[in-house]
Image: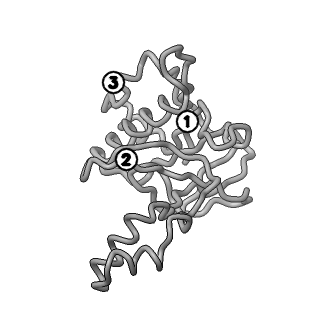
Amino acid sequence: MDHYIDLKLLPDPEFAATQLMSALLAKLHRGLHDLRRDDIGISFPGIERSGHSLGSHLRLHGSAQALASLLALNWLTGMRDHVQPSELRAVPSPVQYRHVSRVQIDSNPERTRRRLIKRHGITEEEARQRIPDHAAKRCDLPFANLRSHSNGQTFRLFVRHGPLLDTPQPGSFGSYGLSTTATIPWF
């Protein structure tokens, strides 16, 4: 994690920054999945100022070789008019570190009821009594709207930026560039 690339969304009159960030994350996911890399992480440097939005700034973290291999895939095709990428840069020092992870929220009571009916053989009315509509969990974390390639369903990818740490933590990153174990440099 000694290098980074900044990707800043350009203002667009036709698309909101939230839509563009969701599209950018979907393309990044495909690129990381195709590369089969677990050593590239992401962060959203403007997250504290953005509220429920991930903002308009995505930072990719990794070694110079890992980031160069991602860029060689040309995964930004279709987004080039909407993104201003920086050059590959060395991480400044000193820095702090933080975990940037995915948080999964079960916010769909209907889906939970269907699962309950299937697993426990109860009636729909019993399931509705056990899990009322107002039982949906709320999450105040920023998110991106994405579409699953496996089932075509849309879902929210909630992202949590953990507390600042003084030392890096080793680990691997998933195909969204997020990790509960590994940290990214924060600057």
Would you place residue 102 above or below residue 91 in this image? below
Q: In the rendering, at what x and y percent does residue 33 appear?
A: 31, 48
The residue pinned by badge 2 equals 154
Label 3 crowd bin: few (<14), some (14–19), many (20+), radius 10 Å: few
* CB-based contact (under 8 Å), mark 1 and mark 3: no
According to the image, label 1 marks what residue?
Answer: 58
Mark 2: few, some, or many residues within 10 Å (few <14, many ≥20)? few
- Cα separation between marks 1 and 3: 16 Å
| Mark 3–mark 2 CB contact (< 8 Å) | no
| Outermost residue, left side | 150
**Quadrant containing the C terminus in the rendered view:** top right
Residue sitting at x 50%, y 45%: 62
Instruction: Give the residue displayed 34% in from the left and 22% down from the top.
Output: 78
**Along the polypeptide, which appears first: circle 1 or circle 2?**
1
Is 31 displayed left or right of 103 in the figure?
A: left
Q: Is 72 or 173 nearer to us in this picture?
A: 173
Q: Tell which of 68 and 12 is nearer to you.
A: 12
Mark number, residue 77: 3
